[in-house]
Amino acid sequence: LKTNYGTLSSSQAQPLQSSSAALIFHPHASPPNNHETSEHTSCSFYLVLMGPRWKGKGSEAKALADPMSKIVLQLQSSLIKSEAQGLLCGCSVLLGTEAQEADLLNRSCFGVPITTSEKSKQWFQLGMEEAFYLHYSLKCLMIVDENKHLMNDEQLWLYMKSKKETFPDFYKAYSHLRMKNWVVMSGVRYGVDFVAYRHHPALIHSEFAVLVLSPEEENGCWHGNSRLRTWSDIHCTTRLCGGVVKTLLVLNVSRNGDNAITPSCTEKFTVYEYTIARWLPERCREDHMVVKSKTSDSAVAEDGTDMQVPSKVLGTPPIEEG
């Protein structure tokens, strides 16, 4: 795939990521509230800053000159102007575009290009979360069913829920990251749900491998992702993420008792962010290890030194600032 930033191989077209501070927690514990940690949850924070891994000397400068937020706005404007329509097909949406829109879709990392014999259009296959984000959040894509009938928000929402029970949680997680200007792509190659990039994959390696979990049950049954329910799964997943130089990011989506009948219900959802890392037994006890205070955003090292740590694990990528 050729882009304005260089050539992206097929192995990079659907990547994953990880990096940043680390939280160790019991998989069955309830998430903490906004001000304190649950007394039943034993957790420790460690400052593990891996940093972005740019591909080449000029990659960071290119990203700064062309921020992802600007590209997405250009895509939104272009799709609205052309009155773009996607065709609902199973668990994906097919979108035919002209050259300008195809370039913007590639640069903003929405969808996967499809090779066809048609010369006048470039076709893209959008995942359910991607398509609904363009349709509902950005309001720049209309979607029709196989009978060419235009679908409204509620119809499309119910259809996608019927295809994927956890769609409300996954969409909330996807939009949560996208709205912070992270590039979100499939994480299937790394055994996770998504991977998050700071910018285009041609410029930088992914930083976070993302799992979407739900702490709630419906009618006595667990309706969310079953991952990280055992310690062996936690060990395997963190080991894999470490091997590919990514940080495991868990997005715990709480529906707050809502039944998610309409897409507007997602506004009531709460997303808790955690990063998880392996504890190394050989680590020297006297090494500086940052533990977050339960009552403030300050942190205390083992030698008693006060240190400041971010109040949120994941925020807008620094390159978007200013």
Image: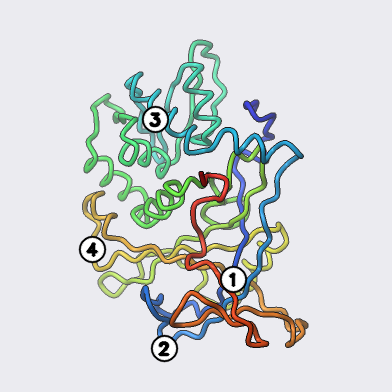
Q: Residues within 10 Å of mark 1 (few under 14, many from 20)?
A: many
Q: Which mark is residue 258?
A: 4
Q: Is residue 265 above or below residue 199?
A: below
Query: Label 2, on which residue?
Result: 39
Q: Is disc 4 placed on a helix, strand or loop?
A: loop
Question: Which one is nearer the viewer's eye here, 154 or 25?
Answer: 25
Q: Is disc 3 placed on a helix, strand or loop?
A: helix
Question: Which one is nearer the viewer's eye here, 136 or 262?
Answer: 136
Q: Residues within 10 Å of mark 2 (few under 14, many from 20)?
A: few
Q: Is residue 31 above or below residue 181?
A: below
Q: Residue at x 54, y 62 (%)?
A: 249
**Contact? badges 4 and 3 (CB < 8 Å):** no
Q: CA distance from mark 4 to mark 3?
A: 30 Å
Give the residue type that dot 2 points to. Glu
Q: Is residue 169 above or below residue 3?
A: below
Query: Label 1, on which residue?
Result: 22
